[in-house]
Image (cartoon, grey):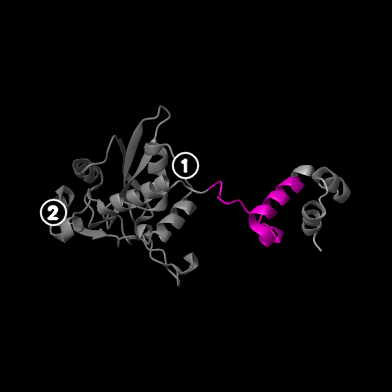
């Protein structure tokens, strides 16, 4: 017979005091009192083992935070911007004051059906690294968010040569816009000559091919490339490693 059943029997059936039973079985009076109350409320179920796992996880995200993660994912993706877990984590910290790990963000995005399962994901060692064979054969560009020591939010725009990894241009802006991309691209051409092609992600500052269902016109950067007869290459959606050299 379990100690819990012995205690209940002594108090409820034998009519002994809780203090007396607690002393006899070497347990606290509070434990006896709680056990008796549970028995009177639940009956035989009071003798079932109790899980020590908390009813709620202290690290569980608030529903409002989960909803914000989903909103950021769909909003960024809808604008053609990077919507990966790192970017979402940056927005949460810098714009909402909420710190969430990328693994937690990934877990909630997956639960919301916003991440496609990759059961046969290739190991990184199987990927073949690529680079242009000649200088100015291909330029890559991308931009990232950064917060200065004084709290100012900026965006850093980079242009690199795909062959040599040489940084052709690295500039900071309050916000990277289409005209900023065109201006820095022109300046880099003035300093280093034109590239044969460019490689970027699908952000709206680089391309409008996914905007409006692909029915939008060319943006400033696309027009610049067409006028200069420069080939434009873009990474596949949700494959940011294609442009991982910037």
At 83% from the left edge and 46% from the top edge, which residue is drawn?
A: 22
Task: Indicate the secondary structure of the residue bearing disc 2.
Answer: loop
At 42% from the left edge and 60% from the top edge, which residue is drawn?
A: 110
Quadrant in which the N terminus is drawn: bottom right
Residue toward you, 27 or 194 = 27
Q: Which residue is mark 1?
A: 99
Residue toward you, 241 or 18 = 18
At 39% from the left edge and 38% from the top edge, which residue is drawn?
A: 96
* Side of 195 where 28 appears, left or right: right
* Side of 221 where 35 appears, left or right: right
Asked if the stretch drawn in magenta spans residue 35, the answer is yes
At 23% from the left edge and 57% from the top edge, which residue is drawn?
A: 197
Q: In the displayed orientation, state which residue is furthest to the bottom.
A: 120
Between discs 1 and 2, the one toward the N terminus? 1
Residue 51, position in %: x, y? 66, 57
Q: Is residue 85 above or below residue 172?
A: below
* Side of 237 where 186 appears, left or right: left
Residue 160, position in %: x, y? 33, 49
Residue toward you, 171 or 208 = 208
Task: Indicate the secondary structure of the residue bearing disc 1.
Answer: loop
Mark 1–mark 2 Cα distance, whole angstroms, equals 38 Å
Residue 95, position in %: x, y? 37, 37
**What segment carries the magenta color?**
31-59
Residue 208, position in %: x, y? 18, 54
Q: Which residue is mark 2?
A: 218
Q: 10 Å neighbourhood of mark 1: few (<14), some, or many (≥20)? A: few
């Amino acid at each position: 017979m379990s100690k819990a059943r012995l205690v209940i029997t002594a108090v409820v059936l034998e009519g002994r005091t809780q203090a007396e039973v607690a002393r006899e079985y070497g347990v606290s009076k509070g434990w006896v009192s709680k056990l008796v109350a549970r028995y009177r409320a639940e009956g035989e179920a009071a003798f079932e083992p109790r899980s020590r796992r908390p009813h709620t996880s202290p690290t569980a995200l608030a529903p409002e935070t989960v909803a914000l993660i989903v909103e950021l994912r769909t909003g960024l993706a809808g604008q053609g911007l990077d919507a990966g877990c790192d970017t979402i984590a940056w927005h949460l910290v810098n714009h909402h004051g909420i710190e969430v790990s990328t693994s937690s963000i990934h877990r909630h995005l997956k639960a919301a059906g916003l991440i496609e399962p990759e059961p046969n994901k290739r190991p990184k060692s199987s990927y073949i690294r690529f680079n242009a064979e000649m200088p100015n054969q291909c330029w890559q560009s991308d931009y990232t968010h950064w917060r200065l020591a004084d709290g100012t939010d900026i965006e850093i725009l980079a242009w690199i040569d795909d062959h040599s990894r040489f940084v052709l241009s690295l500039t900071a802006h309050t916000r990277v816009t289409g005209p900023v991309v065109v201006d820095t691209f022109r300046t880099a051409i003035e300093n280093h000559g034109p590239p044969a092609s460019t490689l970027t992600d699908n952000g709206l500052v680089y391309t409008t091919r996914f905007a409006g269902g692909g029915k939008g016109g060319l943006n400033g950067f696309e027009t610049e490339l067409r006028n200069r007869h420069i080939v434009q290459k873009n990474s596949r959606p949700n494959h940011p490693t294609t442009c991982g050299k910037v």
